[in-house]
Amino acid sequence: MLKLSWQEKLADNKGLPKIVPIEGKLSKRWGTGTVFVPAPRQVDALMKKVPKGKVTTINEIRTTLARQHGATIGCPVTTGIFAWIAAYAAEEAAAKGKVRITPYWRTLKAGGEINPKYPGGIAKQKAILESEGHEILKKGAKHIVADFENKQVKAELMLVGLQTAQSGWRKKNKIKIKKTKTSK
């Protein structure tokens, strides 16, 4: 069996997106309501909306997707994994000569932390972020974008134009958001 490329992993919808009830073990941590589980390209699409000089966080992407789809929360696990896949797919595209790639270095972990698992690790992202005008602070083992809260693209701005783009994406890929029933 051949190993999938990062681009192929990004394109694999995995039966997503879907909205599922928060229940069982999840309800102890997240309460009640629903969780939106995005498709990889939905996470990538929001990452692409972050302009030079700005940043966002995985949590802001989760909040944006949940709000867009009427769910209580966005899935923290899949959103993080799909951001990681988008980052490696971007580097794979760059290695093939593509100039405009997803600016994954602008998507931070909670608290403004640079994600050490992204391609090139902290050193590469730090250099790019500094070249875009950000100051990077070292706090213990973590590298934080200084004053990231004031440089963060908010959910409302990320949603501008995204609704139309995703509608076209859903039609092209014949995607419908699945809602599952709450079990009793």
Image (cartoon, grey):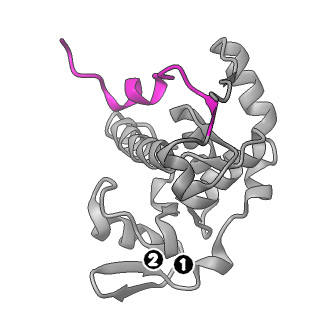
Q: Which residues are magenta?
A: 1-21
Query: Does 31 appear above or below 114?
Result: above
The quadrant of the picture occupied by the N terminus is top left
Left or right for 120, reference 178: left
Residue 75 lies, in percent from the top left, at 55, 45
On the image, numbered disc 2 is attached to which residue? 130
Residue 5: image x %, image y %?
A: 31, 26
The furthest residue to the left: 1
Name the residue rendered at 66%, 11% in the picture: 174
Circles 1 and 2: CB atoms closer than 8 Å: yes
Is residue 31 among what the camera can see? yes
Closer-to-camera residue (182/19): 182
Rendered residue at 50%/69% (across/down)? 110
Q: Residues within 10 Å of mark 2 (few under 14, many from 20)?
A: few
Residue 173's x, y, as percent? 63, 14
Q: Quadrant of residue 56?
A: bottom right
Above or below — where is 1 with respect to 41? above
Q: Quadrant of residue 6?
A: top left
Q: Which mark is residue 133?
A: 1
**In this rendering, position of residue 138 left or right of residue 163:** left
Quarter occupied by residue 150: bottom right
Instruction: Name which residue lies at 48% across and 24% down.
Output: 11
